[in-house]
């Protein structure tokens, strides 16, 4: 793996975080279609990767605290399971503007890596069944591939079954 981003504007806070941590990763770029119905589904299809290996980063509000859930694009975030995973009672999707402000990324390009303000993070346990997974590299049309263990370590996440 260990491929670094190419020069010419592909470096993002996510790839910088990976480089700084000396974590092996591969950058995968594709042409983003603004009309795509699903950012994650578009990434899986464009890269020719099974949708259960491509993970989306969703920001939720759990009892007043922004929390990141990382789940396969083939599924949905189970808000009750996310709340339970962090010892909370109630969860709702965060306001998109709050998610963008907190992460430093735009919707459809929010990465769990290199966020402006690190948030508590839960990665769906299904990630552990794959040798590598794909997550946003911090921009629409750009994904990084890395091991689930590195994703979990860099985001200080824990795993739980939070997808349905």
Image (spheres, helix red, strand yellow):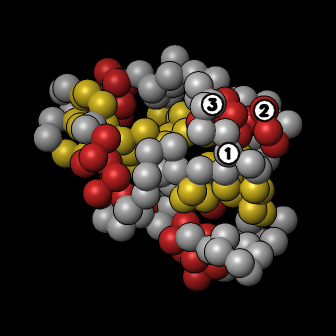
Q: Earlier in the sequence, mark 2 or mark 3?
A: 3
Helix, strand or loop for disc 3: loop
The mark lying in front, picked from 1 and 2, is 1
Report the Cα–Cα distance between label 1 and label 2: 11 Å
Rendering coords of residue 88 (x, y %): 21, 33
Q: Are marks 1 and 2 in contact (CB under 8 Å)?
A: no
Helix, strand or loop for disc 2: helix
Rendering coords of residue 80 (x, y %): 32, 21
Q: Residue at x 36, y 31 (%)?
A: 82
Picture quadrant of residue 12: bottom right
- Which residue position is annotated with label 2? 45
- Which residue position is annotated with label 3? 36
Report the Cα–Cα distance between label 2 and label 3: 11 Å
- Which residue position is annotated with label 1? 32
**Residue 87 visible somewhere in the drawing:** no
Q: Residue at x 38, y 62 (%)?
A: 104
Helix, strand or loop for disc 1: loop
Q: Residue at x 34, y 52 (%)?
A: 100
């Amino acid at each position: 793996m260990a491929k670094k981003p190419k020069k010419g504007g592909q470096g993002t806070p996510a790839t910088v975080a990976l480089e700084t941590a000396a974590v092996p990763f591969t950058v995968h770029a594709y042409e983003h279609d603004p009309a795509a119905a699903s950012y994650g589904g578009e990434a899986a299809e464009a890269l020719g990767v099974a949708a259960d290996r491509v993970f989306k980063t969703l920001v939720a509000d759990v009892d007043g605290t922004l929390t990141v859930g990382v789940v396969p694009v083939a599924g949905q975030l189970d808000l009750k399971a996310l709340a339970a995973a962090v010892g909370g009672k109630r969860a709702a999707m965060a306001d998109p503007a709050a998610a963008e402000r907190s992460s430093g990324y735009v919707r459809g390009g929010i990465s769990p890596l290199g966020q402006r303000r690190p948030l508590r993070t839960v990665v769906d346990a299904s990630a552990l069944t794959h040798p590598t997974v794909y997550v946003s590299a911090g921009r629409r049309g750009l994904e990084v591939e890395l091991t689930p263990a590195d994703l979990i370590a860099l985001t200080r996440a824990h795993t739980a079954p939070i997808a349905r």
